Image (spheres, rainbow, N blue to C red):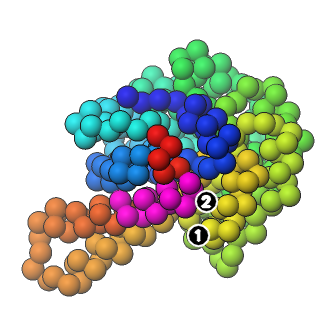
């Protein structure tokens, strides 16, 4: 069954590893991520952006699909289904009503007081229904669907402390130089600030923009309170590279399963690699 992120992130923070959030786009993506989590006996978070939710005809289709897959694939590891970068209180409520076990309210684009107010409202609504909540401060660079930024803005540790205290949020994504999509050059993560946020808040921290972060930085982030790492683009690249290879090597193929099926295998491999890198293997 689906679970909120609360318990899995608490354990991850204590055990000094991170749980991966892997974004889904369709049936095959979901099958691949669940397969990888089950094979490695790892807890897992399925991330759903608002754009991906539109693509899949809405939140209800997604929860119906995920619940049916968990049952039919006999998935026994803890699985959370999480709204990624929820843009409004209404969207978060809609996802919760449809059966999401976790939501992110991303009020990072507005003024601090508005972010606190939005986050607090979502936390009250979600906690009354056993659903976990992630909030964000600062600005993650790059683009993921509707979430676009020209520059990174580093989160202010004192604001992080205040937001966590005033909202009771379960985990926090302090933007500290990470980017959605590929990095131009190497990432320049604010590890000093990350440690400050960890010490000031005591909640599990979330690292967005997990694609293209070197292993040493991943380990450093985990040692400074990061307990959830979001990965999206890397699976998209793995899938597309494989599908391109199939199409390039076979001009006659037209069975969609033969074209996109191999892409699914590429996602399984990529996710298993991330799970091992994040240290959540065997932690189910
Ligand atoms: O919210 C999702 C992520 O932060 C994914 O970032 O596409 O760079 O891996 P990424
Ligand atoms: Zn993100």
Which quarter of the picture shows residue 139?
bottom right
Few, some or many residues within 10 Å of mark 2 (<14, 14–19, 20+): many
Quadrant in which the N terminus is drawn? top left
Q: Is residue 209 visible?
A: yes
Question: Does residue 133 lie above or below 108 as drawn?
Answer: above
Secondary structure beneath label 2: loop
Mark linked to residue 212: 1
Task: Assign the magenta stretch its main secondary structure.
Answer: helix
Q: Is residue 61 visible?
A: no
Q: Are marks 2 and 1 in contact (CB under 8 Å)?
A: yes
Q: Which residues lie in the magenta part?
A: 268-279
Question: Does residue 140 lie above or below 64 as drawn?
Answer: below
Secondary structure beneath label 1: loop
Q: Would you say residue 171 sits in the magenta stretch?
A: no
Give the residue at mark 2.
209
Asked if the residue at label 1 sits under 8 Å from ligand 1, the reply is yes
Asked if the residue at label 2 sits under 8 Å from ligand 1, the reply is yes
Question: Does residue 22 lie above or below 177 as drawn?
Answer: above
Question: Does residue 129 lie above or below 2 as drawn?
Answer: above
> Gap between marks 2 and 1, in whole Å?
8 Å
Q: Residue at x 87, y 48 (%)?
A: 196
Nearer to the camera, 80 or 65: 80
């Amino acid at each position: 069954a689906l679970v909120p992120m609360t318990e899995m992130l608490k354990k991850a923070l204590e055990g000094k590893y991170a749980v991966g959030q892997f974004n889904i786009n369709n049936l095959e993506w979901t099958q691949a991520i669940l397969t990888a989590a089950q094979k490695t006996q790892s807890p897992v978070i399925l991330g759903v952006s608002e754009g991906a939710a539109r693509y899949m005809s809405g939140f209800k289709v997604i929860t119906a699909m995920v619940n049916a897959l968990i049952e039919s694939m006999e998935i026994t590891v803890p699985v959370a289904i999480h709204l990624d970068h929820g843009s409004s209180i209404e969207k978060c409520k809609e996802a919760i009503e449809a059966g999401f076990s976790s939501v992110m309210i991303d009020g990072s684009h507005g003024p601090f007081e508005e972010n606190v107010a939005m986050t607090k409202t979502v936390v009250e609504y979600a906690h009354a229904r056993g659903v976990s909540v992630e909030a964000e401060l600062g600005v993650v660079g790059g683009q993921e669907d509707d979430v676009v930024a020209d520059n990174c803005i580093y989160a202010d540790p004192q604001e992080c402390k205040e937001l966590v205290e005033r909202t009771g949020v379960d985990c926090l994504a302090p933007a500290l130089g990470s980017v959605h999509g590929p990095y131009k050059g190497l990432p320049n993560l604010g590890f000093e600030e990350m440690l400050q946020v960890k010490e000031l808040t005591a909640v599990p921290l979330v690292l967005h923009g997990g694609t293209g972060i070197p292993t040493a930085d991943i380990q450093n982030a985990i040692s400074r309170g990061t307990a959830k790492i979001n990965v999206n683009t890397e699976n998209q690249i793995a899938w597309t590279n494989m599908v391109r290879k199939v199409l390039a090597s076979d001009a006659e193929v037209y069975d969609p399963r033969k074209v996109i099926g191999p892409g699914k295998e590429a996602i399984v491999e990529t996710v298993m690699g991330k799970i091992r890198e994040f240290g959540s293997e065997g932690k189910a």
